Image (cartoon, helix red, strand yellow):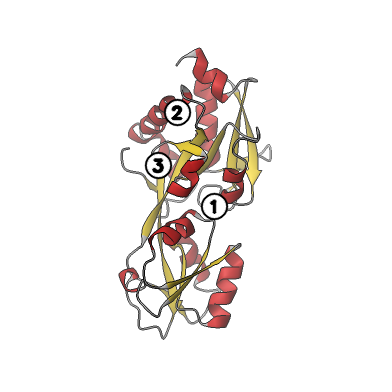
Amino acid sequence: MSEQVVKELAPNGVLRVGINMGNFLLVTGKSPSGDPDGVSPNMGAELARRLGVDVAYVPYESPGLVVAAAGKDEWDIGNVGAEPARMEKMAFTAAYAEIEATYMVHEDSPLKHADEVDREGNTIIVRGEAAYGLWLAANVKNATLITTDKGEEAKERFMAEKIDALAGLRPGQLDDLEKMPGTRILDGKFAEVQQAIGTLKTNTAAIPYLRDFVEDCKSSGLVASMIEKHGVVGRLSVARPG
């Protein structure tokens, strides 16, 4: 590691990690000190350890707010899903973990598989700034896509307005089934949300270092051990090699 990498990522001796608190699979609780805990914070802590600096977590309610803070000197790395729309502001590693995204429908829906949803006449509702919302905005061709600012609003409108499909992460939808009677989850998926590490594009020495760091964490089994430690096996998967 060069001195330039440390200078770019932790110029003041502290690695500031932007954390999306809205992802319950990546942030599963709090540490004894009150800091966010989970796979995402642990990745930040491991990076700080290798850099030889302290770590500080900068929490955000949503991934969109992490991205919006790019260039405002609030964080040094941002742990969010790598989506093309976000690459205008940030450079990303390959994913270190993946989460399957699919649809919830009403029990009486004729839809059986995720591949059937993007068809003329169908409506889909989704939280627009989520990684899977950005993916749908770029890829839905035939159905009508409705976006909301908050996930709870999407759920409420899905139920109240009888919208055909609610897009989301499968693990979260599995938890919501009991809270949303008369619904079911479709087979298949429309995307895999890839959780990655992003930094400013100006950090030209740090970007390749971060990419190598993520690949090492995956191949060494470190990411898998974090997933097991935080009890999200089967809901969060180690991403394929970048």
Q: Is residue 117 left or right of residue 37?
A: left
Q: Residues within 10 Å of mark 2 (few under 14, many from 20)?
A: many
The structure residue drawn at horizontal position 34% and vertical position 69%, both measured from the top left corner, is: 114
Q: Label 3 sits on what residue type? A: Ala
Q: Label 2 sits on what residue type? A: Ile
Q: Which residue is mark 2?
A: 207
Q: Residues within 10 Å of mark 3 (few under 14, many from 20)?
A: many
Q: Quadrant of the C terminus?
A: top left
Q: Quadrant of the N terminus?
A: top left
Residue closer to the observer: 42 or 64: 64
Q: CA distance from mark 3 to mark 2?
A: 14 Å
Furthest residue toward top: 3
Q: Is residue 109 left or right of residue 20?
A: left
On the question of residue 52 being in view, the answer is no
Label 2 element class:
helix
Q: Which residue is mark 1?
A: 23
Residue closer to the observer: 193 or 178: 193
